[in-house]
Amino acid sequence: MTRGISLRKLEEFHNGEKSQFSVIYGPSKINCQKENESMLLVLDSSFNPPHYGHYTLIERAIKRYSGTSNVDISVLLLLSVKNADKGEKPATFDKRLDMMNLLSQYIHNEFPSLEPIVAVSKSAKFVDKSIGIRVNLFETGKIVYLLGFDTITRVLDPKYYVPQTLEEAMDDFMSHTGFFCLTRGEEGDKDDSEEFIKQTKYVDDISSGVFEPSIPRKWGSNIQIEVNNNSYCSISSSQIRKSLIQKDYTSVEGKLPASILEYIIESDREAKSSIFI
């Protein structure tokens, strides 16, 4: 990887005051095929650092939707830099973009037909992020955001949209947007635990009107929740960072792609400190 590209492109993005979205790596435009339905899978995360939990979510979504005939799938890794003027919590945004690019290469190696895109946004809400994506990258087709269960409940929490109702704020957005979620849990949790049951029933509860009038039942068809039962279901970015701050690299092997761990080790060596301090 050519170091410094992420920093330069990030500075250009910040200096463009009117720009709310910008592609850093990958194709600058997705050309949709008319004969096929186009779908953009968007993982919007802090990527601090990117790890196999992120990859699992992407992998499961690709497999879920690629089984549908006549669907062209693209993948977008999106980093929000809205609060950059207040200071970045480590790692810095340019280093996260470097690591996101390495994750995109890992995805491409696993799914050669895909060329994932890495981009940044100054928007905080999904509705506003989608506007930037539509204007700059993906004009038509369905956008599907990839989330953990805790995030989807925050997205659909009416308190974040006051004085509008949730339906007023998101109804148009939900007409052409979907969510793909994996359940979240800690190691040792039983499949029949109250929290697990709550997660797996969430979509059915929406569709049956349990949350009306706050969440319209028609939105249930836009949300897909699958059980995450692999070894990465409880992976924690904060725990990974704690180990990396101590330069305990061995303990995080197998939790993130080797190329990303190698980048972190090399960056620590150059900085003579952890990039997560």
Image: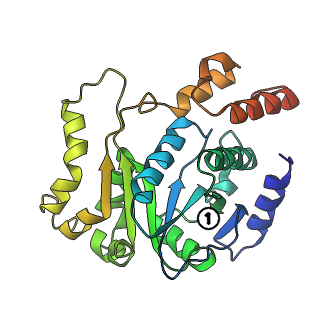
Front residue of 118/13: it is 118
Question: Where, by quadrant of the figure, is residue 133 drawn?
Answer: bottom right
Question: Where, by quadrant of the figure, is residue 184 drawn?
Answer: top left
Q: Residues within 10 Å of mark 1 (few under 14, many from 20)?
A: many
Element carrying mark 1 = loop
Question: Residue 155: image x %, image y %?
Answer: 37, 58
Front residue of 43/167: it is 43
- Residue at left offset 80%, top offset 26%: 273
Left/right placement of residue 90 relative to residue 172 reads right
Pointer 1 residue? 122
Front residue of 38/80: it is 38
Q: How is the image coloured?
A: rainbow
Figure quadrant of the N terminus: top right
Question: Residue 121: image x %, image y %?
Answer: 62, 63
- Residue at left offset 78%, top offset 69%: 15
Note whether 167 is above or below 48 in the view shown.
below
Note whether 47 is above or below 144 in the view shown.
above
For the question of whether residue 245 can be seen, the reply is: yes
Figure quadrant of the C terminus: top right
- Residue at left offset 54%, top offset 31%: 238
Q: Amino acid at mark 1?
A: Lys
- Residue at left offset 42%, top offset 30%: 234
Front residue of 1/63: it is 63
